Image (cartoon, rainbow, N blue to C red):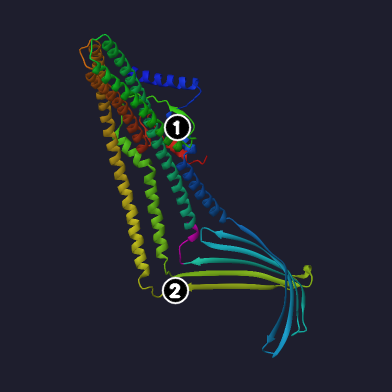
């Protein structure tokens, strides 16, 4: 493992800045990349919205499963009174009827998911006091009606089972969306994290540059006082020093702006001070392109989402095929009714009640509506199948591109590191020339700018490499640095906190 002492030096400088800030009363919160990701997965606004959507589909699925169990219901009518004046056309006279009732119905309803039918058991018990002027007879007593019925649709698809399956797909899709959003948040947080880290390194570099400019200004000032150099050289050096100081201030402003965006994504108060701590080391990672592609095609959640689209499209075909369909219904019910002036004698003389109904609905002509809807549903299904194939191709292409970018990033890091070393050496040589009066301040300014650019370029290349490795991990769901699958890590995103 190659240790980059210059990078370690910058990290130590950053830690010293944090320490000085805390001693001055402005304590900062240190954040590593993993801490930032964990914080975002708890409080990020995007994650919170996805978590609520996941909870909604879960509760809808739970409710539907509960609806498939036995439903118990009790309906009570404690008091019903009516007094009506009516005309009897058969007897050609008016009469008055008076009725007082009280009843209750206990029912059990059980859906049958295998047949899409319903089995119901009802029992109605009540008290009735009837009187009518049209008849000398009146009734005051109790009654009980016990009924068992079966309602069964015929010649059609099972709507109960399909509704349950659709809700299961909705919930699975919501879990996949939640996990995908979590991966997306991890990508965004990592990008912001390294942006902050890069800007911190640029600020350290700009402060180093400012220190060098001050040193140059002191050197030229001494020479001017000694009459060894023209005053114009000192004015140019002073301008360079002021420009460098302005660069430090600009970097501080940009850093604070990026931090605010970062805090928003983490769900942290904007008033909280923070600083990121990162280890940007480069270790060449061996990536088997074939293994990466196959692993991604087998485990990527987008593939499963496209498969769900195909299955729901097939459901849509079934529903569409039921447009203006030939269907039937069978309803069978049996019951036992009894009445008596006293409760004990309700079933002394019971009556049997039977009811059988068989109905058919036969479409005759729909002007081509069903065929047109079927063609539209088939086209939608074919689109879903094409989307699956296209998703697989896109995954293959993305992984190939990332693999090339990783290999290229390693080459660019070596070049950037060599450029930085050369720029550092060149600056030190020319600084000595500047001290000896063999170089103007404008020439030294050129070498200082070159050194700053090369330092920042190396930091950018290191971060680019880390981001490409992250991209490969998220695209394949496999961590090639740790040589392990992250599928289990992704599955934890499905858990509601």
Counting from the top left corner in percent of width and height, residue 301 is at: 39, 43
Relative vertical location of residue 367 with respect to residue 288 in this rendering, above or below: below
Counting from the top left corner in percent of width and height, residue 316 is at: 40, 59
Residue lying at 48% horizontally and 70% vertically, measured from the top left: 328
SS state under label 1: helix
Is 113 included in the stretch rendered in magenta? no
Near mark 1 (Cα within 10 A), the count class, few <14, some 14-19 or many ≥20, is: many
Residue placed furthest toward the bottom = 92
Answer with the quarter of the image where residue 232 lies. Answer: top left
Residue lying at 54% horizontally and 59% vertically, measured from the top left: 112
Q: Residue 394 vs residue 269: left or right?
A: left
Residue lying at 37% horizontally and 69% vertically, measured from the top left: 369
**C-alpha separation, residue under disc 2 versus residue under disc 1:** 64 Å
Residue placed furthest toward the top = 226
Tally of numbered discs:
2
Counting from the top left corner in percent of width and height, residue 304 is at: 39, 46
Answer with the quarter of the image where residue 331 lies. Answer: bottom right
Disc with the residue nearer the chain's start (2 vs 1): 1
In depth, the one of 43 and 272 nearer the eye is 272
SS state under label 2: loop
Q: Is residue 464 visible?
A: yes
Start-end of magenta stretch: 155-161
Q: Which mark is residue 357?
A: none
- Mark 1 sits on what residue? 36
In depth, the one of 292 and 347 nearer the eye is 292
Counting from the top left corner in percent of width and height, residue 254 is at: 37, 32
In depth, the one of 235 and 402 nearer the eye is 235
Near mark 2 (Cα within 10 A), the count class, few <14, some 14-19 or many ≥20, is: few
Marks 2 and 1: CB-CB under 8 Å?
no
Q: Is residue 485 visible?
A: no
Q: Which mark is residue 362?
A: 2
In depth, the one of 260 and 179 nearer the eye is 260
């Amino acid at each position: 493992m190659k240790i980059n002492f210059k990078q370690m030096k910058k990290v130590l400088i950053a830690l010293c800045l944090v320490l000085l800030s805390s001693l001055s009363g402005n304590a900062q919160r240190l954040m590593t990349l993993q801490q930032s990701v964990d914080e975002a997965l708890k409080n990020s606004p995007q994650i919170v919205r996805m978590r609520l959507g996941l909870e909604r589909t879960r509760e809808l699925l739970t409710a539907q499963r509960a609806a498939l169990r036995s439903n118990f219901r009790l309906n009570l009518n404690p008091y019903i009174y009516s007094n009506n004046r009516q005309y009897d056309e058969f007897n050609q006279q008016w009469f008055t009827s008076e009725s007082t009732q009280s009843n209750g119905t206990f029912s059990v309803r059980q859906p049958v998911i295998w047949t899409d039918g319903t089995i119901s058991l009802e029992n109605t018990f009540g008290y009735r006091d009837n009187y009518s002027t049209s008849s000398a007879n009146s009734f005051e007593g109790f009654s009980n009606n016990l009924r068992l019925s079966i309602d069964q649709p015929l010649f059609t698809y099972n709507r109960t089972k399909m509704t349950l399956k659709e809700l299961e797909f909705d919930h699975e899709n919501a879990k996949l969306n939640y996990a995908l959003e979590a991966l997306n948040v991890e990508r965004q947080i990592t990008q912001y994290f390294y942006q902050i880290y890069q800007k911190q390194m640029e600020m350290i570099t700009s402060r180093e540059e400012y220190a060098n400019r001050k040193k140059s200004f002191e050197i030229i000032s001494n020479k001017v006082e000694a009459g060894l150099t023209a005053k114009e050289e000192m004015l140019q050096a002073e301008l360079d020093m002021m420009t460098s100081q302005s660069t430090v201030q600009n970097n501080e402003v940009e850093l604070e702006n990026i931090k605010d965006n970062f805090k928003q994504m983490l769900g942290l108060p904007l008033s909280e001070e923070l600083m990121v701590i990162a280890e940007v080391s480069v270790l060449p990672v061996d990536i088997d392109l074939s293994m990466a592609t196959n692993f991604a095609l087998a485990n990527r959640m987008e593939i499963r989402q496209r498969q769900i689209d195909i299955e729901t499209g097939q459901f849509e075909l079934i529903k569409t095929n039921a447009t203006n369909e030939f269907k039937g219904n069978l309803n069978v019910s049996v019951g036992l009714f009894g009445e008596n002036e006293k409760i004990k004698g309700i079933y002394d003389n019971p009556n049997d009640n039977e009811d059988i109904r068989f109905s058919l609905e036969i479409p005759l002509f729909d002007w081509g509506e069903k065929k047109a809807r079927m063609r539209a549903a088939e086209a939608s299904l074919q689109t879903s199948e094409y989307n699956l194939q296209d998703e697989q191709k896109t995954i293959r292409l993305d992984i190939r591109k990332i693999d090339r970018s990783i290999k290229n990033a390693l080459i660019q890091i070596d070049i950037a590191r060599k450029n930085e070393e050369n720029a550092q050496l060149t600056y030190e040589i020319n600084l000595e020339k500047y001290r000896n009066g063999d170089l103007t301040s404008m020439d030294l300014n050129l070498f200082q700018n070159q050194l700053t650019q090369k330092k920042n370029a190396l930091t950018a290349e290191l971060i680019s490499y880390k981001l490409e490795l992250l991209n490969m991990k998220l695209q394949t769901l496999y961590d090639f640095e740790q040589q392990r699958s992250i599928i289990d890590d992704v599955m934890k995103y499905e858990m509601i906190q």
